[in-house]
Amino acid sequence: MNVSFCTISFRHHLCSIFDLVKWGKEKRFQGIEMWGTHAKYLAEDPFFDFDFFHSFGLKTTMISSYIPLQAARYELEETIRVLTRLCQRFDTKKLRIFAGQKGSIHTGEQERREIVERIRMLSQYVHERGIELLVETHPHTLADNVPSTIRLIEEVNHPAFKINFDVLHVWESGADPIEAIRQIRPFIAHFHLKNVTSKDRLFVFEPANVYAPTGTRKGMAPLFEGVINYKDILSELITFTKDIDVSLEWFGSDVKKVLESDRQQIYNQLEQLKDEAIYT
């Protein structure tokens, strides 16, 4: 299992990319998931490319960005060109987006067909450049529950179209994350891992709160201290036949402290699971 930290965790911090990669290497992260905004501004300096990250033993596992699927076609095409070039510059094969800005139940059939057609077009564009397009399981999108996500996979029907499986948001939808993983397993290319203290605190992950410097962080929980049982999740993830990429998506305070602890606990849990497998 390859564990990445997300640069978006440091969205309100005054720290350099040098500090982050040195810290990431020291704490045994294998990768870095780059927020599209950070990738865009790093790319303005020719010094920063995939060699920079490789020199610290880190790979860019994914660029996470946003594409206005219902914007004018020329705007859509320009956005995907820019993001694809960033993927190539930082040597990542995965670009994450969202499937629209409305929940599946609030999206009419014609609107859904238009979004699907555009996702398929984007999938083909990145496919021709050796990249996969990942849609995240997330509220207020067409991937806001498991049935709609499965339907979306079938509708897009493209080899470059994959899923970024956000465990918390799948749980938020009312589904059993482990059962959902088993249902869409062949299409999962990445996992986002985060936790919450209780269901009534899920609102803290609303984008408006996450991006607000003064937003509340009460309810955001370290990975092994929330309501989702991540030991069970890890037990499922280690059954993947290839090394799977996971990102620790922490939006709260004490960023380095929490990420260091979560990374170490993942390592400890994986070692324990291996030992249990040997002796059972």
Image: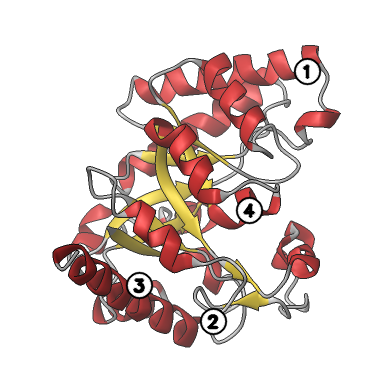
| Identity, as a three-letter code, of the amino acid under mark 3 | Ile
Q: Is residue 118 above or below residue 33?
A: above
CA distance for labels 4 and 3: 20 Å
- Which residue is labeled 3 in the image? 266
Quarter holding the N terminus is bottom left
Residue 139, horizontal then vertical, whole percent: 72, 46
Quick check: can you spot residue 209? no
User: Is 65 on the left-hand or right-hand side of 196?
Assistant: left
Q: Which residue is label 2 attached to?
A: 14
Mark 1 crowdedness (10 Å alpha carbons): few <14, some 14-19, many ≥20: few
Q: Secondary structure at mark 1?
A: helix
Counting residues from the N terminus, which is met first, the one under dot 4 or under dot 3?
4
Dot 1 or dot 2, earlier in sequence: 2
Q: Residue sitting at 71 percent across and 77 percent down?
A: 219
Say whether residue 223 is left or right of residue 113: left
Residue that label 4 marks: 171
Q: Earlier in the sequence, mark 3 or mark 2?
A: 2
Q: Residue at point 49% right, 51% down? A: 40
Dot 2 alpha-carbon crowd within 10 angstroms: few under 14, some 14 to 19, many 20 or more:
few
Q: What is the spatial separation of the Cα atoms under label 3 and label 1, in whole angstroms?
A: 41 Å
Any mark on residue 111, and which? 1
**Looking at the image, is mark 1 or mark 2 nearer the viewer?**
1
Residue 34 visible, this angle: yes
In the rendered structure, which disc, 4 or 2, sits on the residue that comes first in sequence?
Answer: 2
Q: In terms of depth relative to the viewer, which is nearer, 16 or 154?
A: 154
